[in-house]
Amino acid sequence: MLSLVKGSRLAIAVLLSLCLTVTACSNPETASDGKEGTITLTVPDAKIWGEESSALQVMYDLFEAENPGIKVKQTSVEDYAPALAAGKAPDLMLMDPFVAKESYKQNYVEPLDTYYDQYGWGDGMYKWAKNAYSMDGKTIGIPWNYEGLLLVYNETLFKENGWNVPKNYKELVALTEQMKQKDLIPMSWGTSDCPGCDDWWVTSIVNSVLGPAGTKELFSGDKKWTDPAIVEAMQRFTDFWKAGNLSDKKSHSISQEDSMQLFATGRAAMRLDGTWSLASGIETDFEVGFAPFPSWKEDGEPVIPLGVGGGLVMNAKSKHKDEVAKLLTYFFHPDVMKSMAEHGIPEPKETDFSSLDLKPGIAKVLELINAAAKDGKTGYVAWSYGSPSVVSVLESDVASMYLDKMSVEKWLGELQKKKEKDQSENNLFSLSNY
């Protein structure tokens, strides 16, 4: 998950609006290295995204090696919001679907249909991923990766105790009782540095109780957040937290890193996490297992929520659009695709992962997702497909329920009002083509 992109999307949207109402935005300045005939493209800084985005550096290096007349200048992605408002954004940008569409509405993002046709970018690309960057009949970006939510567990501990991986809420609750009898924290969790991470729980829960079709209707149709199935499931989540199953009722006061250490040191037996965590590099002295996260129905089947973590978009004000498009062709180079897969963030194209010599854990997870997709057991992550006002709450205030600041019914009622506001403003994410 490109957290810097996702976490800043509402702020960027506000700045985009201010740009239209306050000032006329100028064209971006074109960088130059002083050599006659050399073009310089400004692009996202590969380092700011961390090790998981080393694929960007691979892409840049391949491009520069084969295109000596074009230089690549890396710039900080943290400057997107002020750069967009000032008209100085880079030629190439990384944006999540919501920000890309808001930017496109205000003529900051260039449609890429001509280049898709010219270079065959769409060949083998999953339609649901490409559709995340479709608007008004135009394709406005290249989906960066797909990501999902999974159960991560101490497989060695499970084998030693003869425990089965839980598939539903009933099995999960029974297992947590056995774990607590052994002085184990059933699940590690921490949100002091990431309140929005609670969104992962809401996403997993609604997908498992509504199924893919129902979740699609919740995000993009008339299904209400006050639906009895959701109310019952969120009450179960609140009860589950109050029972001490998540970091012993301290999840709101410890960080994600702290919670990961609880798991890595064997003090916690399980955790909810995303495919992006596969590249975290945290070492354990036990075997780590991966499975679909248990259904939040007592007798349900798991669903793996999937979504697009971000996308590559072209600045509509760029003076070198054809050169940017040429750079983007390198995103589909085998070396770049391998680098993405190695970090658990595969490009959303049909890929034979068995030929990439991936680490066993990463290969297992990608195969797990492919199998779920074939069986129709993949759903939709809220941060990719929820409406903006709803997502703003999911990324800031889920804790109000389990900390008893607001009842489950009232919290979901307020969330439904946010959805209705988005619906009246035509801001629901269209999932009709998914």
Image: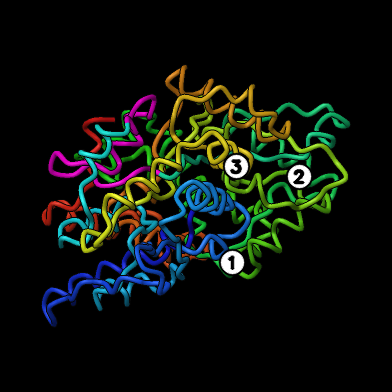
Colouring scheme, one of rainbow, by chain, secondary structure, one colour:
rainbow
Between residue 328 and residue 419, name the one nearer to us. Answer: 328
- Disc 3 target residue: 339
Is residue 53 placed above or below 154 in the rendered structure?
A: below
Q: Is residue 157 left or right of residue 115?
A: right
Residue 218 coordinates in the image, percent (x, y) = 28, 40
**CA gap, disc 3 to disc 1?**
34 Å
Between residue 49 and residue 330, name the one nearer to us. Answer: 330
Mark whose residue sits in front, 3 or 2? 3
**CA gap, disc 1 to disc 2?**
19 Å
Give the mark nearer the N terminus: 3 vs 1: 1
Label 1, secondary structure: give it: helix
Give the mark nearer the N terminus: 1 vs 2: 1
Between residue 369 and residue 395, name the one nearer to us. Answer: 369
- Disc 2 target residue: 269
Give the mark nearer the N terminus: 3 vs 2: 2
Is residue 141 placed above or below 208 in the rendered structure?
A: below
Inspect the image, locate mark 2, and give the three-letter code of the amino acid beneath it: Ala
Q: Which residues are magenta?
A: 120-143
Label 3, secondary structure: give it: helix
Residue 61 seen anywhere in this rendered image of the structure: yes
Residue 145 coordinates in the image, percent (x, y) = 46, 42
Residue 252: assigned label: 1
Inspect the image, locate mark 1, and give the three-letter code of the amino acid beneath it: His
Mark whose residue sits in front, 3 or 1? 3
Category of crowding for the residue at label 3, using alpha-carbon neighbours closer than 10 angstroms: few (below 14), some (14–19), many (at least 20): many
Please report the residue visible at 21 percent of the width from the left and 53 percent of the height from the top. Answer: 110
Quadrant in the picture for the C terminus: top left
Would you say residue 299 sits in the magenta stretch? Answer: no
